[in-house]
Amino acid sequence: MFLALRELAFAKGRFSLMGAVIALIAVLTVILSGLSSGLVNDGVSGLKNMPVSAFAFDEGTKTDNAFSRSVVEQDQVTTWSKQPGIEQATAMGSSMMNATTDDGTQVDVAVFGVDPGSFLAPEVSEGEQLGDVDGLVVSETMREAGVEIGTVLTMDRIDTELTVIGFTQGQATFGHVDIAYAPLSTWQLIAAGQAPAGAPTQQDIDGLDFTYSSVVALQYADEAAVDLAAGDAAASTTAKSLSESFNSSPGYEAETLTLNMIQVFLYAICGLVVGAFFSVWTIQRKQEIAVLRAIGAPVRYLLRDGVTQAALLLVLFTALGIGAGLGLGAAMPDGMPFALEGGPIATAALLTIALGLIGAVISIIRIARIDPLTALGGNR
């Protein structure tokens, strides 16, 4: 430890330069972690907040954007509700639509049709619960577009008018679009192409002969082990757990894979850069280390000292980089999907330190191969 601190003080310039590189890598890990969390929240926060264990899509539905592609019948919902371990099964409709607010503002909405009496009914932070056939409960984030309780959203091309009656608790988005929850019967009226211009009425709903929806939402009984393959075979569906179903939302898989790959390369670069620095540092100190070994310094002591030096450098400058990254993250513009979450940032910091330390240890091991006779000219 004494030697490590002495060298850090002696070669402040070189260690500061190396530390600055580590700090910049830490800043990038925070930014990428925030972008990754923000994109996940923006893409599937509506699904994450649902009390759902799994979704069942129609058999053969293409995985990408399956929520909009899938079409299931009521018989499939009934079949799933009878499967062992399933506490509740209910139909859910999903479709992307364009709409216009009262003041002419154009907005995109992901219309989710849910049964108001089912476990999918959204919890509201303000306004009324879902119920009226012309009522919508929308994501809290729609306030940014000027939407308030009582705002009428007019659906493009069909001119159906639906009134906002409540806001969800927190963000509820799907495919980077705010979710608008409508009664399942209203969604079916729109999906069937029979929605009238103006506000739909109960009479319109009663005259509808359309029993299809997009997916079957499943809720397991407590600690139940559900055989999804058996349920799929019985209902002719393809069921996925809630987390697996995220990949069926628009663009989710491509975005997360891209960011994860960037993060992996960043961690690899961190290990390589730190390893290269300590490799050069060890070569430059070869003569001094040989002298220390010649006067009796144990190899274990020198290795421990070198690892401690690397750990101090990594911890100190990673902490500085994380702090700077948090500051930059707090200054991100509102329009950017960015979320600072403690878990991912802590993981990024630990990985930066751990992989950097691995790279340093691999380089420092060469200390054990330095011959003490080098100090006495034994290599001449």
Image (tube, grey):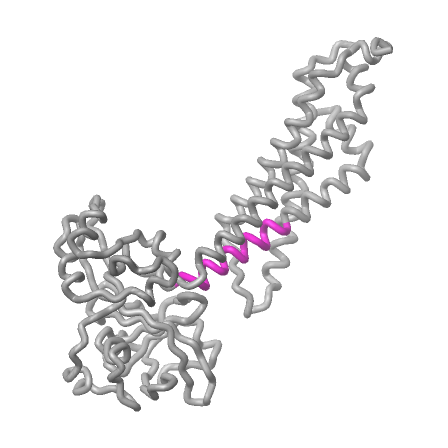
Q: Is residue 321 left or right of residue 339?
A: right
Rendered residue at 52%/49% (across/down): 260
Rendered residue at 18%/85% (across/down): 202
The front one of 163 and 155 is 155
Q: Residue 359, percent across and down?
A: 64, 32
Say if the magenta span includes residue 37: yes
Please tell me how many numbered marks the rendered image carries: 0
Q: Quadrant of residue 48?
A: bottom left
Q: Would you place residue 184 above or below residue 37 in this image?
A: below
Magenta highlight: main SS: helix
Residue segment shown in magenta: 27-45
> Which of the image's four quarters has the C terminus?
top right
Rendered residue at 43%/70% (across/down): 177
Q: Would you place residue 76 above or below residue 128 in this image?
A: above
Q: Is residue 56 left or right of residue 367?
A: left
Q: Quadrant of residue 7?
A: top right
Q: Is residue 53 visible?
A: no
Q: Is residue 259 visible?
A: yes
Q: Residue 179, percent across and down?
A: 37, 71
Q: Residue 341, percent across and down?
A: 50, 54
> Which of the image's four quarters has the N terminus?
top right
Rendered residue at 18%/58% (across/down): 88
Q: Quadrant of residue 245?
A: bottom left
Q: Is residue 279 left or right of residue 64?
A: right
Q: Residue 240, percent across and down?
A: 30, 53
